[in-house]
Image (cartoon, rainbow, N blue to C red):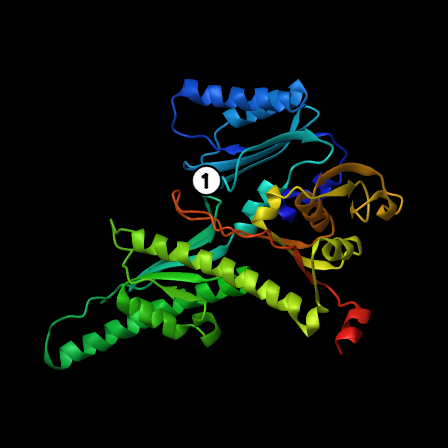
Amino acid sequence: MSDLGLVELLGRPGPWTSAYVDGPGALPQVEEEALRRSVRERLEAAGAPAEDASAIESALATRNELPSPSARVVLASAGRIELDRGFVGARMGPERLGHGPVPTMLPLLRHLSAATRYLVVETSRDGADIRLETSGRGRTDADAEIEGETDGMTKVQAGGWSHAAYQRYAENLWKHNQEEVAAAVSDLIREQHPAFVALSGDVRARQLLIEALTATERELVVEVDAHTRADGADSTELDSAIARSIAEHARSTIREVRDRAATDSGSGGAEGLAEVTAALQQARVQTLLLDGRMLDDDRSLLALDAPPWVATDASESLGASVLASVTAAEALARAAVLTDARILIEDDEPTADDAPRQSRPVRDPVAVLRWADDADANDGS
């Protein structure tokens, strides 16, 4: 999150005007203009100054080159746009428009929490195309094309000694090419730490590439039985495999956080609004996990202008000034950003528009701590 300068942004005084809306679509221009005008009018009705509302309306008129549907988060203060980010895919939750001493950050953090970095390798016997991607960005982070040797690539049907020799030569050439691809993939795994490697392409090339990777690297490979490097190839199977892998990575990350918070009789974690708030006040939180449904919870906390950044009441402010009473989820997330904690938001909303939403209570916030509380650890021993 540091690339967005969120710590520096949240440390500034407000007030702030926040908008979380759909990105540009394919509607006629007059309808798109009406939607942007509606955003401005609703911001002003929420108390935003005209200069902020107009600045956001103008920002939304600038297309961000993302495919539709997309979502957009825009923050303004004193008539100036301070943050403007777009994400591929539909909004995660309802539109949110507001104005106040503290910016609304949860829509942005929700998208960042869902972002997954991964590699895509489309290989063939003469090389490979490699892409480093982050879900939701709508653009490639980095790409490379490996062009291997091609002399004598086709296995000739000469018969006898000639046939066997050419066959061995071609096989060795394919193996050499895939070893070159594997070296590039290994470098990217070591440097970028992708969640998984989606591998598609020619069957034999895939086999040789996997053989050239280490056992640890092979565990990251999600093999897709489709030759997508061929001209005009259909990428549907590859896209579906990537989507499934992103979803599984999100689930496994949530499981890992809950397991880590529960280790050593829970001494390495905190669970519950009061416990997590106290841990954030001490800057002990390494990872904060919020239930997506907590974003609409009516519980509140105090947002402060200095450490400890969050409080249940003014007596806990330690001399810091109270900026506002905000929703508990916003207050916890803001304190997590300001204390350099990782934030994850657990969503289990229906994937289909017509699917029913599971009925359940809001889960308590959970935190993995940077260090255990000695008293808690002793109690559990």
* Residue, disc 1: 90
Q: Secondary structure at mark 1?
A: loop
Residue 179 in percent (x, y) is at: 38, 70
Which residue corresponds to the image point at 37% horizontal and 75% vertical from the top-left? 211
Query: Could you say which is closer to the camera, residue 309 or residue 187?
Result: 309
Residue found at the far right of this picture: 319
| Count of marks overlaid on the render | 1
- The answer to whether 27 is drawn above or below residue 325 in the figure is above
- The answer to whether 255 is drawn above or below residue 86 in the figure is below
Residue 325 in percent (x, y) is at: 75, 38
Mark 1: give few (<14), some (14-19) or many (20+) Cα within 10 Å: some
Please state if 367 lies on the left or on the right of 232 as rendered.
Answer: right
Which residue corresponds to the image point at 43% horizontal and 47% vertical from the top-left? 356
Residue 328 in percent (x, y) is at: 69, 45
Residue 349 in percent (x, y) is at: 48, 49
The type of residue carrying mark 1 is: Ala
Residue found at the far left of this picture: 159
Query: Could you say which is closer to the camera, residue 98 or residue 171?
Result: 98
Image quarter of the C terminus: bottom right
Which residue corresponds to the image point at 47% horizontal and 19% vertical from the top-left? 34
Q: State the image quarter where residue 76 is shown.
A: top right
- The answer to whether 76 is drawn above or below residue 159 in the figure is above
Query: Could you say which is closer to the camera, residue 66 or residue 232?
Result: 66
Which residue corresponds to the image point at 74% horizontal and 57% vertical from the top-left? 275
Please state if 280 lies on the left or on the right of 364 as rendered.
Answer: right
Visible residue check, residue 261: yes
Q: State the image quarter where residue 161 is shown.
A: bottom left
Query: Could you say which is closer to the camera, residue 222 or residue 124?
Result: 222
- The answer to whether 206 is drawn above or below residue 275 in the figure is below
